[in-house]
Image: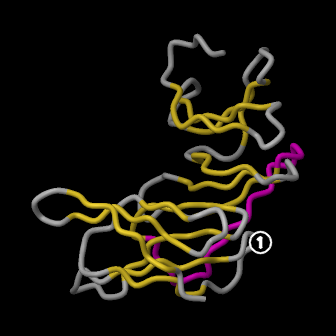
Amino acid sequence: TTSDRSRELDPLWSHDGEWIYFASDRAGPASTWRIPAAGGEAEPVGPRGFIPRWASPDGRWLYGQIFNGGPPPVVRVALDGSGATDELIEPGREVAGPVTIRASGIYAVERLSRDRLDHAIRRWPLEGGQGRLVASLPASRPAPFDVSPNGERILWERDMGRGYDLMLIEAAY
């Protein structure tokens, strides 16, 4: 599919299987590119520093984060060629760790206190707006997590000090 001398990372299929999205440094700092799944030329998608995480089922949006120093905002990028970008988490909220994006919303770890290790997972609507608390995490560093297809449970990687365990958390809505 790609044979460029650059690094290609974070591959992601479009929901219809027609496109493959990926991060690449082929034109400088990492940004998102897409290539037809059947083969062809890669083309850039979205702003510099944008890393894809999820493609909307209707093929209109690509969701991800922009990594340009500082806390990476969660955005959606229009795939209609306009280059339109919307920031989706309300101002003042700082994503403190991994992000998971599903049809049920955008899930992100948020630090609850600057002086403690208390964190929570919030869910924001895909179109942006107010986030809702869905789970409180015991004192720990932010770690990877995933959300069940129905959005009711969260599988979280917790640092137990002696190693990592997986924890299942019921989402509170």
Residue 84 lies, in percent from the top left, at 80, 56
Q: Is residue 16 magenta?
A: no
Query: Which amino acid is tagged 1?
Result: Glu
Q: Quadrant of residue 48?
A: top right
How dense is the environment of label 1, judged by Cα within 10 Å: few (below 14), some, or many (20 and up)? Answer: few
Q: Nearer the viewer, residue 167 or 74?
A: 167
Way the structure is coloured: secondary structure
Per the rendered image, the range of residues in magenta is: 79-95
Q: Report how many numbered discs are placed on residues in the image.
A: 1
Q: Which residue is mark 1?
A: 127
Q: Residue at x 80, y 17 (%)?
A: 38
Q: Main secondary structure of the magenta part?
A: loop
From the image, which quarter does the C terminus lie in? bottom right
Q: Is residue 89 magenta?
A: yes
From the image, which quarter does the N terminus lie in? top right
Q: Residue at x 62, y 68 (%)?
A: 106
Q: Quadrant of residue 167?
A: bottom left
Q: Residue at x 10, y 60 (%)?
A: 162
Residue 114 lies, in percent from the top left, at 28, 85
